[in-house]
Image (tube, rainbow, N blue to C red):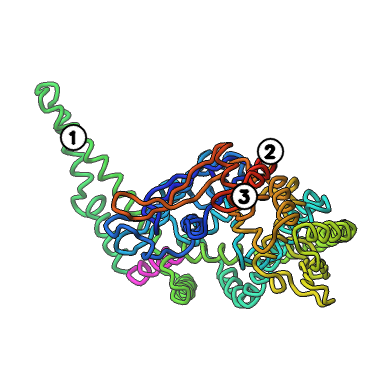
Amino acid sequence: MLQKLVIRNYAIIDHLTIEPDAHLNTVTGETGAGKSIILGALSLILGERADTSVLINKNEKSVVEGYFDVSNNDVFKHALTEAELDNEAQCIIRREISTNGKSRAFVNDTPVTLNLLNKLTSLLVDLHQQFDHLALETDNFQVEALDAISNTIAAAENYRKLYYKHKSIKQKLADNRERQAQWQKEADYKQYLLDELVQAAFKNEEIEQADQQLKQMSHSERIVSVLQTARQLLEEGEQPLVNELKRINQQLQSITDVMPEIKPLQERISSAWAELKDIAGELEHEEGKVMLDPAVMEELLQRVDLGNKLLKKHGANTTAELITLQQKLEEELKATMDVNEAIEKLAKEEGAVYKELITEAEKLSAQRKKALPQFIKKINELLVLVGMPNARFDVRLENVPPSAHGTDQIQFLLDANKSGQFQLLQKAASGGEMSRIMLCIKSLTAKALHLPTLIFDEVDTGISGEAARQVGLLLRELSQYHQVICITHQPQVAGRGTRHFYVYKEADKNERLSTKVKVLQADERVLAIARMIGGEQPSEAAISNAKELVN
């Protein structure tokens, strides 16, 4: 609900504040007083394009602010959350036009694009201007209106959940089939690569170890010669180092009782002797490991050659990378089998859900068709009351493939002059007729549908008398469930308002005219409505008539 509208430096508006109530707000005033200008300012915060020609004072920016109570508007709050905007009980929407012509929009002080602003405010304000047929450009409004009348809103919501469930499954199925097709193209080649790696059957670090072993075997004679020479120096020959150290150790040990301070040196010699003896044994062991078998060398050479070939082929550097690649190929080929199973499962699920979806769609369509004659009858009765006695309203239902709204394509039709030729409502109705038809439809659906603030711009154009009275009654009835703002020239409509705004021009000390707005009290309302009936100097009869309308 719109709590407050503040306009500064816009066209002939210097500064004004409008605070509508929660029900029917009527706006009256002389032609040219500025009612359309107020609507133009309001359109700015609804996402309309800005025009710098509206700036009165070229040295100051133009600002329009709307304060909305959104505490009960769950759809709007969800839209705020999706847009990552602050979500509070009151939403402040601001539009600024700077002196250089640039325009900026804000939602709760956060800058937003015009597209986002338009999307958000469409959930807050429904502006019915003449020649505004936007509500009928899509099926949404027609479907929602018919569901409200046929009491199928809950059934439609259940169907919609099922529809999106089916859509989600269908998308998963399509994704898996695309993945399957892509994998199938690569599966044969991947299987070839895997078979090659499996057949090679490399163990961890095998290529590196085999390569190192080959290097050793190719230098085996030199290695054995070095190992033997070292061992001989330690344990064999005329004066082996191990034996000499052992002798030195024994000699030092024989004098430790008379020269105790030599004991640490003797122990170090003993330790060195033991270490060299141990090294000699290990040299002998390593000498025994050196292989000279040509058959083993040939086998190692083949393994290294195969390994290097596969490393080069796969752009790998180590045996570990080849083993990791083998595991990856195994997983990918297993995933191909898994996706086949997933497709089979999803296909069965999609079929079952689609069958359920069609069943629910048929039930929903049957309920809509059952309620249709009464809906058409009521609209036609209301059209007579609001001054369209020659108009005939009809609804066309056509069966279409399942969509978010069911399997019904719903189109509102109008024969404006009993010609027997029905056309789409948005093509057949004039601006004033469209506003009245929309008023009739919304008055029937008011209890069932959550609607934003409804603004009607001169919905009563071209009618008077009883038709104007009926329009006033419909607006008042609609305002029991929704906030309504109506710009009107008809006293029968103005008298139904729960709050009456009067728009007028006033000159300042420099004789510059600006638009002002004031809320009329009871006596002021009577006088204003009497002037709408009988002119600037209303008669007693006009005043009496005005009192009757207000009361």
- State the residue position of label 2: 551
Q: Nearer the viewer, residue 550 or 172?
A: 550
Q: Nearer the viewer, residue 487 or 22?
A: 487
- State the residue position of label 3: 452
User: Residue sitting at 39 percent across and 57 percent down?
Assistant: 12
Classify mark 2: residues with Cα within 10 Å, few (<14), some (14-19) or many (20+): few
Element on which disc 3 rests: loop
Label 3, label 2: how far apart the Cα atoms are: 28 Å
How far from the left and from the top, in percent, is residue 218?
35, 72
274 is within the stretch colored magenta = no
| Amino acid type at mark 2 | Asn
The span picked out in magenta is 207-220
Residue 202 position (above or below residue 240): below
Pointers 3 and 2 in contact (C-beta within 8 Å): no
User: Residue sitting at 46 percent across and 45 percent down?
Assistant: 92
Mark before the other along the chain sequence, 2 or 1: 1
